[in-house]
Amino acid sequence: MEAEEPLPPGQHVPRDWPVLHYGRVPRFRPERWDLRVQGATASGRESRWTWPEVAAMERERVTADFHCVTRFSIRGVLWEGVRATTLATLAAPADDATHVMVWAEYGYSANLRMSDFLTDTSLLATHRDGEPLTSEHGAPLRMVVPHLYAWKSVKWVRAIEYLIADRRGFWEERGYHNVADPWLEQRYSYQEELPPA
Ligand SMILES: Nc1nc2c(c(=O)[nH]1)N[C@H]1C(S)=C(S)[C@@H](COP(=O)(O)O)O[C@H]1N2
Ligand SMILES: [Mo]
């Protein structure tokens, strides 16, 4: 057997890839769908793209493990999509933007530090393992931030909001950790008050 990279603490690999989310799977209606970049943009304006425009953006591939806070990890997922840095070139954040809120259908959201968003491996993914995303895994567009717990990898993304001050997203408001680094086991918000281990 080949030696494998270690998993973050407290994680295991299940037999199948679970589908996990809060609420219903939204139906994709391409004619009504758009992607917005809003909030603290450098231009002061909101940007908006239709589905054909997003589908025509330059795409990259990233292979990474995927870690859910409920303790399953999926090894070596091949994602394909638009780099967050590419989007930030098309619609630049203001100089004083420090965080982003990633917004999904039905109001689900997750906040990220700008540095976590603007990492080379952060994608707005359209494909997984060479196939277009299925609806339940976030089609047509999902955030993928492989170095953080997967609740930050927002499915059914509709907007990126640049923030000049941090604000907690859906799970971050409900007891989950604001940063969510799986290697530091940043699972719960009470850990934010603990001295570093
Ligand atoms: N819009 C939305 N995105 C979401 C969620 C959600 O409830 N709504 N759940 C998150 C959580 S907790 C996990 S573990 C992953 C699961 O992704 P998967 O269903 O593709 O395995 O999606 C994340 N993205
Ligand atoms: Mo999760």
Image (cartoon, rainbow, N blue to C red):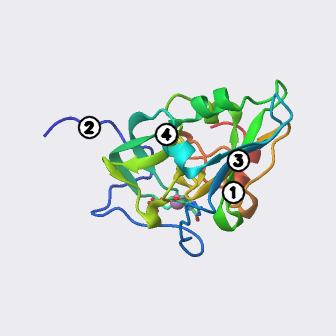
N-term-proximal mark, 1 vs 4: 4
State which mark lies toward you, 1 or 2: 1
Q: Do the numbered discs 2 and 3 sit on residues whose CB atoms are within 8 Å? A: no
Ligand 1 has an atom within 8 Å of the beta carbon of the residue at disc 3:
no
Q: Mark 4 to mark 2: distance in Å?
A: 36 Å
Q: Amino acid at mark 4?
A: Ala
Give the residue pinned by disc 2: 4
Residue highlighted by disc 4: 56
Q: Is residue 40 left or right of residue 116?
A: right
Secondary element under disc 2, as helix, strand or loop, is loop
Can residue 66 be seen here? yes
Q: Is mark 2 within 8 Å of ligand 1?
A: no
Question: Mark 2, residues whose alpha carbon is within 10 Å: few (<14), some, or many (≥20)?
Answer: few
Residue that badge 3 annotates: 36
Residue 149: where, in percent of width, then height?
Answer: 54, 49
Residue 137 in the image: state x and y as whole percent.
Answer: 45, 61
